């Protein structure tokens, strides 16, 4: 395995572990009063409905684009599969990020209510970290893996970036 790919895989693992640890820390924070939890649950259900609707439409468009890209001889099926891998990783990262962000909202509110702004900002700062890391790492890993698989060798800065 080339050194660049090994480095990307190692960074990916570290970033995913950081995202998992950060998510666990966020979810371990207090959720506030019963009323706060009721409101948070309603928001979470609404966000899940939104994501389901959005991903249904995006999946249909992505599937159409997959076949269009695949049937264009100049672009071809390898690029179509790379597109599909990127779309799947992006969707997974979006789902994970939205899930953690929504669940962090009530915890941030509780921290502000009980401990003040400083504690609330700690949670709010961590809130966006897992989503950003998941998205970046999944994109980087997907690009390197697709580049390696489809091109035989991968030169950073060319092709997939």
Image (cartoon, grey):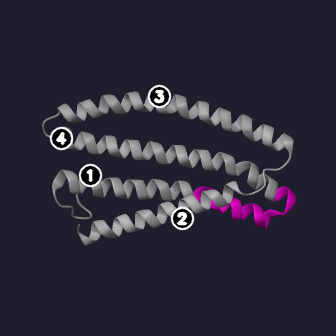
- Crowdedness near tag 1: few (<14), some (14–19) or many (≥20) residues, C-alpha within 10 Å: many
Q: CA distance from mark 2 to mark 3?
A: 30 Å
- Relative height, residue 139 to residue 63 (above, below): below
Residue 146 — which label?
1
- Crowdedness near tag 2: few (<14), some (14–19) or many (≥20) residues, C-alpha within 10 Å: some
Quadrant housing residue 87: top left
Label 2: state its secondary structure: helix
122 inside magenta stretch: yes
Q: Position of residue 60 (x, y in %)?
A: 39, 27
First in sequence: mark 4 or mark 3? 3
Residue 56 — which label?
3
Are the two marked residues, 2 and 3, in contact with CB atoms closer than 8 angstroms?
Answer: no
Residue placed most toward the observer, 56 or 23: 23
First in sequence: mark 2 or mark 1? 2
* Horizontal side, residue 32 vs residue 41: left or right: right
Quadrant housing residue 154: bottom left
Front disc: 4 or 2: 2
First in sequence: mark 4 or mark 2? 2
Residue 24 — which label?
none
Q: Which residues are magenta?
A: 112-129
Q: Position of residue 59 (x, y in %)?
A: 41, 31
Quadrant housing residue 43: top right
Q: CA distance from mark 4 to mark 1?
A: 14 Å
Q: Position of residue 63 (x, y in %)?
A: 33, 30
**Residue wearing tag 4:** 75
* Horizontal side, residue 57 vs residue 63: left or right: right
**Residue wearing tag 2:** 18
């Amino acid at each position: 395995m080339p050194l660049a790919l090994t480095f990307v895989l190692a960074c990916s693992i570290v970033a995913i572990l950081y995202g998992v640890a950060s998510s666990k820390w966020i979810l371990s924070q207090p959720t506030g009063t019963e009323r706060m939890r009721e409101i948070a649950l309603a928001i979470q259900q609404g966000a899940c409905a939104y994501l389901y609707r959005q991903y249904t439409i995006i999946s249909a468009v992505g599937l159409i684009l997959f076949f269009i890209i695949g049937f264009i001889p100049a672009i071809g099926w390898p690029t179509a599969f790379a597109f599909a891998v990127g779309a799947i990783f992006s969707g997974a990262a979006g789902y994970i990020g939205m899930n953690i962000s929504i669940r962090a909202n009530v915890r941030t509110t509780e921290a502000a209510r009980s401990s003040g702004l400083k504690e609330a900002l700690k949670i709010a700062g961590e809130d966006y970290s897992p989503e950003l890391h998941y998205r970046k790492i999944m994109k980087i890993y997907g690009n390197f893996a697709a580049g390696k698989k489809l091109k035989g060798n991968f030169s950073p800065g060319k092709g997939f970036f």
